[in-house]
């Protein structure tokens, strides 16, 4: 038979197997979970978010997309630079990127069995046989062979295709995890920047309070020494100064922690890089708050999409376990030249070829195969429950932050009113002091109340900024630009 015959036969077998393979893939075909029917995040509509004094009025825009560089809405070039530095230097993002690259390579690994595998084999051996009565003495024989070996597993039941499906889903999971890391990094960087600004503003105000406390203590001591005040007044002033001084160490510690955290997020050790001194009054409050509808959020948040990808991988695992219950058919073809010495390998008469088909039908594996499939089904059901839980938790987070922003606006308005009232009171007492109708201690106490009101307003302003950051994160940010659907070309 001509050496070309095995090639023709193998080609015919492969064409036939392709028709068979295209026929079916056992196991469930994954269907994306339906979008939730929930139309709103909160049981009652949000109240209007008033603009207290000169504060910015915020409004919710349902269905509006989140900007790719949403942090630029805070109007701080220094913040933009820090976030860009964090994205560039973050070891966490680099780790997630490389994990995604490895997962995408696994798709190629899973796809390989769809094609025939070819190997070059070579063999050399020497054997010894005992002599016979007619031919006494040992006999030695040499054997050399070289040639290609081709094998192909027919994916009759779709096990390979389900493996590709599973690997693709796992790669998508890693892509969404990269999105989670990106969203966490950018949100954390902005949060720490706002925290730095808040702590610095509080420290400045507390220092002003301590300065007033010292002035109050000096006046009280002078009054006591002049016989116009009691010793208890001096002790009360000293106690007030001490109490306000205790406010500084925790604030300084919080400032240091926020600076260190932002350095780490930027990919630097705290001793090697110090973030800018952000000012609260230089951070703008975004006026428009983009909010995805619930039916859109499940297709935007990377943590929800990651849970969906896990569910998809579990579905494919059921198909793999099901296919393993059925027979496996393998085709092999070999072509080689064999001879007693290397020179014989160049002799066309020494050609040997073969074509074979092998069928393996599972009979008894101690219940392993059926148990594996049942376990795959149970895992799918567990992942489905996890997916639903992820969606519900996400909706709860959005509801929390929307209510927080609503209450932030009310809190800010109340703090602005309190600050204006304290300032008006301080101005009135200052005027009374000028005409001799109030004491200097009354002036200092009024100024002290005004500074305390300022402290409350600063905290309310920062709370509004921080909750705005949480809303961007709850909406899923704009992570798709950093985690593309396809692998980037080097």
Image: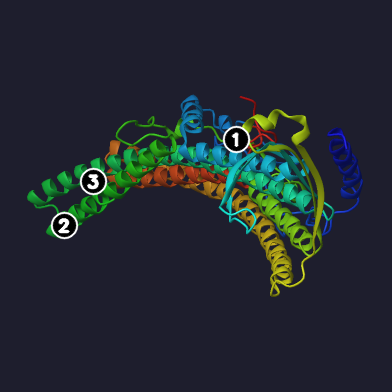
Screen quadrant of the C terminus: top right
Disc 3 crowd rating (10 Å Cα; few below 14, some 14-19, many 20+) is: many
Residue drawn at (68%, 32%) of the image:
344
The image position of residue 238, as x and y in percent, is 18, 53
Q: Residues within 10 Å of mark 1 (few under 14, many from 20)?
A: some
**Residue located 66% across and 50% down the image:** 306
SS for tag 3? helix
Q: Is the residue under label 2 in contact with that under label 1 (CB below 8 Å)?
A: no
Q: Image quadrant of residue 136? A: bottom right
Q: Nearer the viewer, residue 110 or 234?
A: 110
- The answer to whether 165 appears left or right of 452 in the picture is right
- Give the mark nearest the N terminus, 1 or 3: 3
Which mark is drawn over residue 213? 3
Q: Along the polypeptide, which appears first: circle 1 or circle 2?
A: 2
Residue drawn at x 70%, y 67% is: 372
Q: Quadrant of residue 365?
A: bottom right
Question: Can you identify the residue that label 2 sits on?
Answer: 235
Q: Quadrant of residue 31?
A: bottom right
Residue beneath the point at 18% across and 47% down: 217
Q: Nearer the viewer, residue 86 or 115?
A: 115
**Residue 52 in view here:** no
Q: In this rendering, does residue 280 appear at all? A: yes
Which residue position holds label 1? 286
Q: Where does the N terminus fall, quadrant-wise? A: top right
Q: Secondary structure at mark 2?
A: helix
Whether the residues at callouts 2 and 3 have beta carbons within 8 Å, the answer is: no
State the scheme by which the image is colored. rainbow
446 displayed left or right of 282: left
Could you say where residue 350 lies in the image, as x and y percent from the top left? 75, 35
Lower sequence index among marks 2 and 3: 3
């Amino acid at each position: 038979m001509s050496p070309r015959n095995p090639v023709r036969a193998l080609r015919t077998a492969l064409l036939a197997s392709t028709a068979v393979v295209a026929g079916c893939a056992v196991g469930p075909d994954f269907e994306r979970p339906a979008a939730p029917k929930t139309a709103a995040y909160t049981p009652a509509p949000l109240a209007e978010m008033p603009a207290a004094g000169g504060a910015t009025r915020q409004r919710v825009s349902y269905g509006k997309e989140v900007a790719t560089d949403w942090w630029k809405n805070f109007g701080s070039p220094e913040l933009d630079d820090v976030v860009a530095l964090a994205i560039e230097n973050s070891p966490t993002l680099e780790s997630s990127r490389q994990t995604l690259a490895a997962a995408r390579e696994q798709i190629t690994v899973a796809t390989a069995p769809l094609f025939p595998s070819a190997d070059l084999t070579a063999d050399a051996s020497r054997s010894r046989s005992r002599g016979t009565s007619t031919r006494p003495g040992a006999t030695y024989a040499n054997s050399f062979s070289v040639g290609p070996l081709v094998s192909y597993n027919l994916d009759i039941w779709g096990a390979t295709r389900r493996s590709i499906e599973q690997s693709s889903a796992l790669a998508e999971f890693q892509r969404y995890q990269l999105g989670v890391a990106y969203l966490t990094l950018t949100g954390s960087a902005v949060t720490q920047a706002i925290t730095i600004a808040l702590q610095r503003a509080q420290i400045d105000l507390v220092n002003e309070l301590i300065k007033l406390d010292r002035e109050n203590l000096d006046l009280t001591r002078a009054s006591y020494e002049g016989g116009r005040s009691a010793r208890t007044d001096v002790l009360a002033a000293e106690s007030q100064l001490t109490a306000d001084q205790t406010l500084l160490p925790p604030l300084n510690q919080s400032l240091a922690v926020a600076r260190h955290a932002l350095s780490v997020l930027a990919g630097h050790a705290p001793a090697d890089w110090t973030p800018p001194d952000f000012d609260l009054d230089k951070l703008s409050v975004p006026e428009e708050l983009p909010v995805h509808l619930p039916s859109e959020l499940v297709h935007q948040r990377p943590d929800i999409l990651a849970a969906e990808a896990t569910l998809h991988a579990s579905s494919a695992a059921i198909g793999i376990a099901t296919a393993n219950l059925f027979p496996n058919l393998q085709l092999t073809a070999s072509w080689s030249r064999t001879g007693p010495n290397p020179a014989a390998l160049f002799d066309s008469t020494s050609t040997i070829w073969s074509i074979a088909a092998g069928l393996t039908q599972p009979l008894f594996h101690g219940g392993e195969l059926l148990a594996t499939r049942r376990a795959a089904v149970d895992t799918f059901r567990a992942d489905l429950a996890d997916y639903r839980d992820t969606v519900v938790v996400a909706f709860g987070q959005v509801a929390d932050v929307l209510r927080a922003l609503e209450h932030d606006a009310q809190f800010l308005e109340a703090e602005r009113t309190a600050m204006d009232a304290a300032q008006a009171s301080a101005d009135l007492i200052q005027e009374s002091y000028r005409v001799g109708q109030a004491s200097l201690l009354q002036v200092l106490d009024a100024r002290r109340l005004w500074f305390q009101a300022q402290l409350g307003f600063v905290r309310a302003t920062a709370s509004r900024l921080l909750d705005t950051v949480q809303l961007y994160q709850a909406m899923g940010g704009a992570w798709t630009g950093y985690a593309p659907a396809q692998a980037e070309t080097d």
